Image: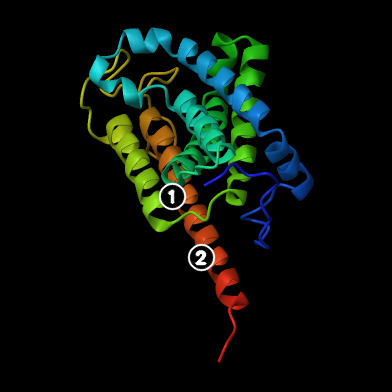
C-alpha cells in the first residue's frame, strides 16, 4: 500500500456521525502531520501531568492510568500510519474510542466537581483542560474519512476500554493513592453526590455512557458505510 496522495472521499453520512464540516475535515487531513505533532505534544504534556500519579501507582497499573495521553497517542499513531499508507483499523478504532470517551469524560468531570477543581486549579489550566479535551472529540469525528471501522477493529477498541472501565471503577486490582480504586478525583471516592451515588459512581456512570456512545457511533458508521457500498452495486 502506498501513501495517500490526495484527500479521501467523504461518504454521505448522517450529521450525527459526521458533524464536523467538510472544510474543517479537509483542513485536518491536509495538515495531517501537524495534527500528529500537536497530539504528540499533548501526549507529552499528559504524561507530565500524570507523573505524580504514576509515581504513586504500582507499575503494573500504569497502562490504565494516563488515559487522555494514550488517547492522543493513539490518534497520532493512527493518522501517521494512514499518511504512510498503512492504515491500521484497530489503531484507528482505539483512537476513535479514546478521543470520544476521554474527550467527553474530562469536561464532564471538570463540571461535576467544578467548585473543587476551580479552587485547586488555575483558571487558565482549567480552561485549557476543558477545551483541549473537547477538541479531541472533534478530531475523532474526522477518522471516518480514513477507515471503514471493521467490526474486528471495533472489538479491539471495545475490549481495551472495557478493561479500562473494569480496573478504574469496578475491580480494584491495586489500591490507588487516593482510595480503593486508582482513579483520581478531587474529592473522596465515597463522598455522597446525588441520586444515591457516591463520587466514584458518578464519574463511572459518565465514562460508561461515553464508552457505549463510542461503540454506537463506530458501529453506526460501519453500518452506514456498508449500506452505501451496497446501494452502489448493480442489481439483477
Q: Considering the image in quadrants, where does the C terminus appear?
A: bottom right
Q: Residues within 10 Å of mark 2 (few under 14, many from 20)?
A: some
Q: Comparing marks 2 and 1, which lies closer to the viewer?
A: 2
Question: Position of 167 compared to 90: left or right?
Answer: left
Q: Residue at x 79, y 45 (%)?
A: 23
Residue at 45%, 47% (x, y): give it: 89
Residue occupied by mark 1:
212
Q: Position of residue 178 (x, y in %)?
A: 32, 14
Let me know if residue 60 appears in the view.
yes
- Tell me the residue that label 2 is attached to: 223
- Position in image of residue 168 (x %, y %): 32, 30
Mark 1, secondary structure of its residue:
helix
Q: CA distance from mark 2 to mark 1?
A: 16 Å
Image: 3 above or below 115? below
> Against 44, is 158 above or below?
below
Residue farthest to the right, as pictured = 23
**Residue pictured at 44% horizontal, 36% vertical:** 194
Q: Furthest residue to the front?
A: 2
Q: On the image, which quarter does residue 128 sit in?
A: top right
Displayed quadrant of residue 107: top right
Instruction: Choose between 205 and 91: the one closer to the eye.
Output: 91
Q: Position of residue 74 (x, y in %)?
A: 48, 32
Mark 2 lies on a secondary structure that is helix
Q: Residues within 10 Å of mark 1 (few under 14, many from 20)?
A: some
* Rendered location of residue 220, percent (x, y): 52, 60
Between 184 and 157, the one nearer to me in the picture: 157
Amino acid at each position: 500500500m502506498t501513501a495517500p496522495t490526495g484527500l479521501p472521499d467523504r461518504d454521505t453520512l448522517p450529521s450525527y456521525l459526521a458533524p464536523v464540516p467538510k472544510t474543517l475535515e479537509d483542513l485536518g487531513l491536509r495538515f495531517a502531520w501537524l495534527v500528529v505533532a500537536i497530539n504528540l505534544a499533548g501526549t507529552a504534556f499528559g504524561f507530565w501531568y500524570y507523573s505524580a500519579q504514576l509515581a504513586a501507582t504500582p507499575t503494573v497499573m500504569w497502562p490504565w492510568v494516563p488515559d487522555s495521553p494514550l488517547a492522543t497517542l493513539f490518534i497520532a499513531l493512527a493518522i501517521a500510519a494512514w499518511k504512510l499508507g498503512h492504515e491500521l483499523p484497530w489503531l484507528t478504532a482505539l483512537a476513535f474510542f479514546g478521543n470520544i470517551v476521554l474527550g467527553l469524560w474530562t469536561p464532564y468531570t471538570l463540571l461535576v466537581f467544578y467548585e473543587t477543581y476551580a479552587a485547586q486549579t488555575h483558571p487558565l489550566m482549567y480552561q485549557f483542560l476543558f477545551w483541549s479535551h473537547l477538541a479531541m472529540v472533534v478530531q475523532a469525528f474526522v477518522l471516518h474519512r480514513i477507515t471503514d471501522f471493521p467490526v474486528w477493529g471495533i472489538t479491539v477498541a471495545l475490549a481495551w476500554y472495557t478493561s479500562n472501565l473494569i480496573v478504574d471503577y469496578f475491580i480494584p486490582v491495586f489500591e490507588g493513592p487516593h482510595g480503593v480504586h486508582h482513579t483520581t478525583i478531587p474529592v473522596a471516592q465515597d463522598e455522597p453526590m446525588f441520586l444515591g451515588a457516591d463520587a466514584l459512581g458518578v464519574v463511572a456512570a459518565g465514562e460508561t455512557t461515553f464508552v457505549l456512545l463510542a461503540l454506537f457511533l463506530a458501529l453506526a458508521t460501519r453500518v452506514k458505510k456498508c449500506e452505501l457500498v451496497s446501494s452502489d452495486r448493480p442489481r439483477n
